[in-house]
């Protein structure tokens, strides 16, 4: 029995409060079970109680838009990889904390000879962007008026920081850095079958 049928009244109320949530997708995909959905809905209700609805514009002016979500990609092993993004992070007490800095959506591609990083930084100029690299890390920061972005990515391979090259166009930053030890094509060893 699904969490929806067990909690029909709650479901109707949640559906009215959050018409933008794709409840059917959650249930049909099987990715989110009853306990997860129950916990998520309770957390949303609890958060809604703490929001000052008398002046919602004050929150937006103070923190800017509040964005949080998951990005799902298929990893090299064929398994799904979930990454969080946005400026709302869980805190030690469990209540989410919104930050003025947003975490941009970032994709890291480990290729044979280079590491390619694509970051979405809409609303900033290229002179507002600061990129730092070490042998194992990439740090991207941007500050422009009410748009602040910040992210730090640990890399699974070593890179040559001084070879970094960055281009910025239409809100997309593309960073390319040479790998310290490029993957060499192996001819392999032929195994004889008995």
Image (cartoon, rainbow, N blue to C red):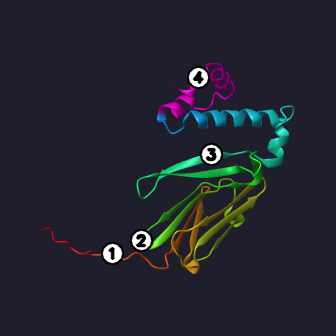
Please rate how many residues cluster around mark 3, counting C-alpha atoms within 10 Å: few if below 14, some from 14 to 19, many from 20.
some
Along the line of sight, the residue nearer the viewer: 141 or 39: 39
**Residue range of the region highlighted in magenta in the rendering:** 1-28
Q: SS at mark 1?
A: loop
Does the stretch in magenta take in 8?
yes
Q: Of the residues under marks 1 and 2, which one precedes in the sequence?
A: 2
Reply yes or no: does residue 94 show up in magenta.
no
Q: Which secondary structure type mostly characterizes the magenta part of the structure?
A: helix
Which callout, 3 or 1, points at the residue further toward the start of the chain? 3
Q: Identify the residue under disc 4.
A: 6
| Residue that badge 3 annotates | 69
Q: Quadrant of residue 166?
A: bottom right
Above or below for 183 versus 85: below
Q: Is residue 113 left or right of residue 104?
A: left
Q: Residue 175 at x, y = what percent?
A: 56, 67
Q: Residue 73: x percent and y percent?
A: 49, 51
**Helix, strand or loop under label 4:** helix
Marks 2 and 4 sit apart, C-alpha to C-alpha, by 51 Å
Residue 98 to residue 19: above or below: below
**In front: 93, or 148?**
93
The residue sitting at 83% across, 47% down in the picture is: 62
Q: Quadrant of residue 32?
A: top right
User: Which of the two discs, 4 and 3, sits closer to the camera?
Assistant: 4
Q: Which mark is residue 112?
A: 2
Q: Label 3, label 1: how many angstroms apart (C-alpha)?
A: 38 Å
Question: Marks 2 and 4: CB-CB under 8 Å?
Answer: no
* Viewer-nearest of discs 3 and 2: 3
Among the two numbered marks 3 and 2 on one chain, the one whose residue lies closer to the N terminus: 3
Q: Which mark is residue 185?
A: 1
Look at the numbered discs 1 and 2 and tell me whether their residues touch, using CB distance below 8 Å. yes
Q: How many marks?
A: 4
């Amino acid at each position: 029995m699904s969490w929806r049928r067990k909690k029909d009244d709650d479901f109707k109320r949640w559906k009215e409060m959050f018409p933008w949530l794709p409840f059917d997708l959650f249930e049909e995909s099987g990715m989110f079970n009853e306990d997860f959905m129950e916990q998520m809905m309770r957390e949303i209700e609890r958060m809604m109680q703490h929001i000052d609805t008398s002046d919602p514009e004050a929150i937006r002016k103070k923190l800017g838009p509040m964005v949080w979500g998951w990005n799902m990609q298929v990893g090299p092993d064929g398994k799904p990889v979930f990454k969080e993004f946005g400026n709302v992070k869980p805190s030690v007490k469990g209540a989410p904390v919104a930050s003025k800095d947003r975490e941009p959506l970032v994709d890291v591609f480990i290729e044979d000879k280079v590491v390619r990083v694509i970051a979405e930084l809409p609303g900033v100029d290229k002179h507002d962007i600061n990129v730092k690299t070490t042998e194992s890390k990439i740090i991207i920061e941007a500050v422009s008026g009410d748009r602040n972005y910040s992210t730090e990515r640990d890399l699974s391979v070593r890179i040559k920081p001084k070879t970094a090259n960055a281009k910025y166009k239409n809100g997309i930053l593309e960073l390319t850095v040479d790998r310290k030890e490029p993957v060499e094509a192996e001819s392999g060893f032929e195994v004889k079958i008995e």
